[in-house]
Amino acid sequence: MSTTTSRPRSTRRVRRPLAAVTASFAALALAACGGGSGFDEGGGGSGDGEEGAGGETGGGTLEVLIGSSGDAETQSVTEALEAWSAESGTEANLSVAADLPQQLSQGFAAGSPPDVFYVGVDHFAGYAANGSLEPYADQIEADFFPALVESFTYEDTFYCAPKDFSTLALVVNNTAWQEAGLTEDDYPTTWEELSTVAEQLTTDGQVGLSFGPEWQRIGTFMAQAGGGLVDENGSANVDTPENVEALTYVQEMLAAGTAAYPSEVGAGWGGEAFGSGAAAMTIEGNWVIGALTNDFPDVDYTVVPLPEGPAGQGTLQFTNCWGVAADSQNKEAAIELVRFLVSDEQQMAFAEGFGVMPSVESVRDRWTEQFPEQAAFIEGAEYAQGVPPVEGISDVIGDFNAQLEGLASGDPQQILTSVQGSLEAVAP
Amino acid sequence: MTTARPAGTAAPHRRRRPGRGIQSGQAAAGWLFITPMLVLLGLFLVLPIAMAAWVSVSDWTGRGNPFGGAASYVGGQNYAELLTGGGLPQRDFATSLRNNAYYVLLVVPIQTALSLTLAILVNRRIMRGRGFFRTAFYFPSVTSSVAITVVFLFLFTASGAVNRVLSYLSVGGPNWINDPRGVLHIVLGAVGVDQPPAVLQSAPFLGLSWWQWLAGPSVAMCVFIIMGIFTTSGTFMLLFLAALQNLSGEVEEAAMVDGTTAWQRLRYVTIPMLRPTIFTVVTLGLIGTWQVFDQIYTGTRGSPGKTTLTPAYLSYETSFNSQQWGRGAAIAFILFAIIVVMTIVQRVVLAERDVVPARKRFYRTGQKGGEPS
């Protein structure tokens, strides 16, 4: 306390400059916060300067946000946007998200989302339910694959145009295949044959088959057994004898040591296990082609359709759509841009650029002609199951995946019962 | 809130001597001095917390302004879902609590003991190269946690450096970062208990069975535990070091004259005098370990098998990825409550007791300088 009493004389002298300093500090702090205050209603004050009053007529710049798989994809999308800007006269500005769901959520919460962006199937239902997405898809004329349309339909409304898609197929290492004395006639077409070749391909330091411990891979076996996550009405239908059969089959392969999760062979995902030679076969999607070309250019491989299960063929498909924000100031231009991006020509350009499959049937034959070695992937489109468009599905699949990691020592019935309970809560 | 004190202490003066006394401007000046801090705290701390509190009792779905009609009041529904809901949210929350509880249980005592040991070691005057060791031990603390996480991920892969070293010792290392098995489950499995006994199958607490609660940290979580100890011990070593250098040498000399051994001096002289610092270290440790987020975010994102899921990461995941902002905010507030309760409990446990035997009482004189600032 001695300090407070010994200084009164100087107080008077310093007070005025002090007050000025304090005031300017406070003003600075307030000014700094004014610019970024999150919750502007309707986005009126946000992003000012870019979208002026004339935004509706197409004068404003479109903000495009994508989650890119790599330079090739970023490059392709950049070129597409440049081509469209030259054609339409509207600027389009591309940003690549480090964490797409997080950045989208921030945009929606702040009322200043990007105008056009990627939406993954597992997040689609959540964004559709809270009204963030503009249901514009009926304004686009294109013959999308029906299964893709289903993936982006929420409560009977088709929301957004599928961008492209991928399916899963069996990737086989030709060298390992020949070393095991197998020929082209031996590509497995049934579960029994798959088990047999996996056993033949398993050697010291090489496992026959490897796939990630997740529904996004193991779900193919469920589809082949006639099961799945939901029934035709979209209700939870996980706890079925078909699914039990599928998981039991996978468990048997894991127990026999002819199949292993990538982490067990020191790889991060199936493609890496396959490319590094730790696995002779893997279940992966189209993206594996690009990854193998980049990381393991010397591996000689063939892509064949997945074997048939007790209920016939089955695989899974993954897709994104071009979302348009309901809060966008420039919806017409945004929809115009999407129309351009899903056109036949542009879809083929993307397919050449970064190895995806066009989402429209009209270029299917052209694509197969150009990429004959990937025919197995597009064949899958006929019988593929997608991620059900249910709000909260990503949590349920996440929980399912967590349990599948312990499948080798777990009880399939118990896993399915638990997932059924979780899925019923979001898809009654 | 210590900044508010000058104003508060100045006030009685003014009341005693009203009018245009020689000190009349002090309170105003005091308030002016703290205004910038008050504004900053209010704007960036109090206001966001109040906003989050509202979101945690609302049904906001992440679009539009939650204070302008985009959200409505739902009472304790978000909290109920987490604590008594019986569904996936409750199970996830319980799992994250379990994971984090084991993390805290292992990291806090070990890092406190380790940092105290390190501090005592580098405090010895006869040691050569003290400066080097002080820097070396402190180094992990100033390195970005993201960088350290990435390095640890490489060290602990199935064919990584750690497993290679273990293989020289003819030990088959586990698949560290990808191994979801609980440590206690592994131990129980080794003695033949690999299925839960019927007693442990019931799930009376937060929807997770006793068998699951008793899993112990997973092998993957152990990597984070090792990393947590590695990165924070240096910081706390610094706190202990500051405290040790504040202890007066006379007390120790007096103890020497009394014929104590080195261990007795440590146990009955040094450690009791460090009590305030131990309190600081344990409190900071508790708070930090309950909030573990960035290692999980960069490292595993909750996998394998959700065994590295922590409440802080779950809150983020629930809000940003699942659009359940109310529930995410509720998790944050429950976590806050846990930290407050734990700190209070620890304060009571570490409180000074007046029933110290007379023969130990001499330490009170040296106690004042213990707390570093």
Image: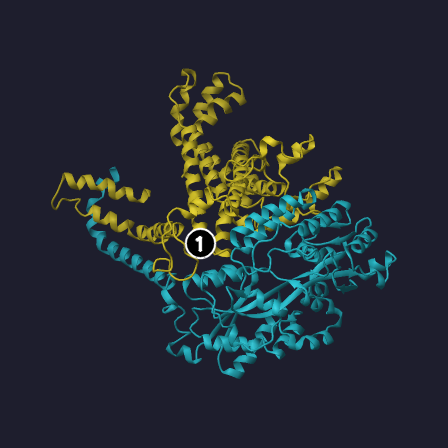
Chain colours: A cyan, B yellow
Q: Residue furthest left?
A: B19
Seen from the viewer's position, the closer of residues B310 and A194 is A194
For badge 1, the amino acid type reads Trp
Q: Position of residue A357 (x, y in %)?
A: 66, 70
Q: Up-down: is A407 above or below A32?
A: above
Q: Residue at 57% x, 76% y: name it.
A: A341
Q: Up-down: is B34 above or below B251?
A: below
Q: Position of residue A283 (x, y in %)?
A: 71, 58
Q: Residue at 20% x, 44% y: name it.
A: A8
Q: Position of residue B156 (x, y in %)?
A: 66, 46
Left or right? Give the position of A188 relative to B218. Answer: right
Query: Circle 1 — which element?
Result: helix
**Would you name the residue on which mark 1 appears?**
B325
Left or right? Give the position of B136 relative to A308. Answer: left
Q: Is residue A72 visible?
A: yes
Seen from the viewer's position, the closer of residues B32 and B207 is B207
Q: Is residue B305 visible?
A: no
Few, some or many C-alpha atoms within 10 Å of disc 1 (few <14, some 14-19, many ≥20)? many
**Residue B202: quarter of image:** top right
